[in-house]
Amino acid sequence: MYRTPTLLIACMALQAHAQLCNQTANPMPDGQDFSLIHAVHRDGGGGLTLTLYNTPSGPFLTRWSPTGEVLWNRNFQHMDPHNWPMPSAVTGLSNGGALITGDLYPDQGAYRNMYAAELDTDGNAVWARIYMLDSVGAMNPGPRALIELSGGGYLFPIRTDEGLSISKLDVDAVPVWTKRYRIGTGFQSGSTVFVEGNGDITLIITVTGQSTNVVRLDPDGNLLWKRSWPDIGYGVLHTTNGEIIVTRDDGGANWYLARFDALGELLWQRSYPYQHMDAFYNGGVREISNGHVLLLGEGVLIETDANGALVGQWTVGGYGLAGRLLGARQPHGDTLMIAGDEYSGLSVWTNLLTSSSTADLACAATAVTGTSTLLAPIEITGDPLTIVQDSLKTWTMNFKPVSTALDLDPTAHATPTCAAGFVPSLWRDRHG
């Protein structure tokens, strides 16, 4: 289900001088929608937000300073006007650059390809490639964020109707191996991928209405072990000590938080009453430096201790109802940056809230009372994991020269039609 506007929170590095609660906006050409898709913090401070333009001109990437100022905006387009690069995710790189991924939508509605590109610290393209899964059965591929490997190269997760595909890429982003992972026969509604310190790969695969599965693979994608639990998976966090936190909601009156150890054993599970449908559908979870956990849902931010006990709860005003907590890298401090869609007349811009801690959210949030209940952990047998050898084709992609978003003529890239079957709200649902 699609809901607007979107809200996203990323925990940022604490600055030398404490930040006050502050809101800034990224001004864009009037009359255009720049809807927020994904965001991550940067290890050196500040963050990156990836937005979808309301006409098929390609992704917009914005670099924010640690105090919430816009450093630059970049727009990327394919050289072929009949293939529109829609944004999916952004990843911060150790060299200060970034990786973006997304879909290539053809205007004739043929099989959809994917793309990935590396950008330097100023947002200029270093390389860009197009990808296509060979398997005909793995329809509706949904590219996730590329994961940088410490030894060089990347992992490329791709959610499909037939399970989660993982492709290991070399330093030139060319596939080395590709495998698809499926739990049972139910609909694979969610998937998250982490790389452990020893190179092992952890998958979190959710089967709608059935189970959440913690799967551990070796660096070559072979199964080491699997654990299965009742349906408790939406937002997922990899903690600093290698444990896993998973959130969900029951579509009615409760949110849930569960913590697994590094071997997939469920340590505890808690519920948090909150009357809102699908509260965590677009939400997520973050760990801050003292081990506390932040959960973001529809209009509400929750802080718990490391054992899930409630520390504080806030309604987050000025950003609408929809919540989204995305991005992977762990923060090095407690300063918060909350990005969301701001409606201004006919335009939709990205708004950024910065705060030195949850205690300083007064400019956009109101503290409210809340409770939590400890639940008994229950493991289930679960369906078996099927691994299918697959392959990923790739070829070079040419981006048009980078343009600064603020210099764009807002009508320059308008088009009277969209790709067959492409509806922006449905696209955002599929990547939700």
Image: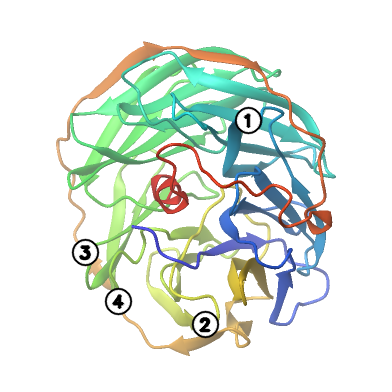
**Dot placed on the residue nearer the N-terminal end, 2 or 4:** 4
At x 46% / y 36%, what residue is drawn? 193
Q: Position of residue 149 (x, y in %)?
A: 63, 28
Quadrant in the picture for residue 357: bottom right
In this picture, residue 91 sits left or right of residue 118 = left
Q: Is residue 395 above or below residue 249?
A: above
Q: What amino acid type is highlighted by mark number 3?
A: Leu
Tell me residue 327's x, y (percent).
Answer: 56, 50
Where the N terminus falls, by quadrant? bottom left
Mark 2 Cα-neighbour bin, 10 Å: few <14, some 14–19, many ≥20: some
Task: Tell me how far mark 1 sits from mark 4, CA to CA.
Answer: 38 Å
The residue that mark 2 highlights is 317
60 horizontally vs 369: left or right: right
Circle 1 or circle 4, nearest the eye: 1
Which mark identifies residue 346?
none
| Secondary structure found at label 3 | strand
Marks 1/2: CA distance? 35 Å
Residue drawn at the location 50% of the way across and 19% of the way down: 132
Disc 3: which residue: 375
Residue at the disc numbered 1:
116
Question: CB atoms at circles 2 and 3 under 8 Å apart?
Answer: no
Mark 2 belongs to which amino acid? Gly
User: Residue, x 41% and y 64% (percent of image)?
Assistant: 3
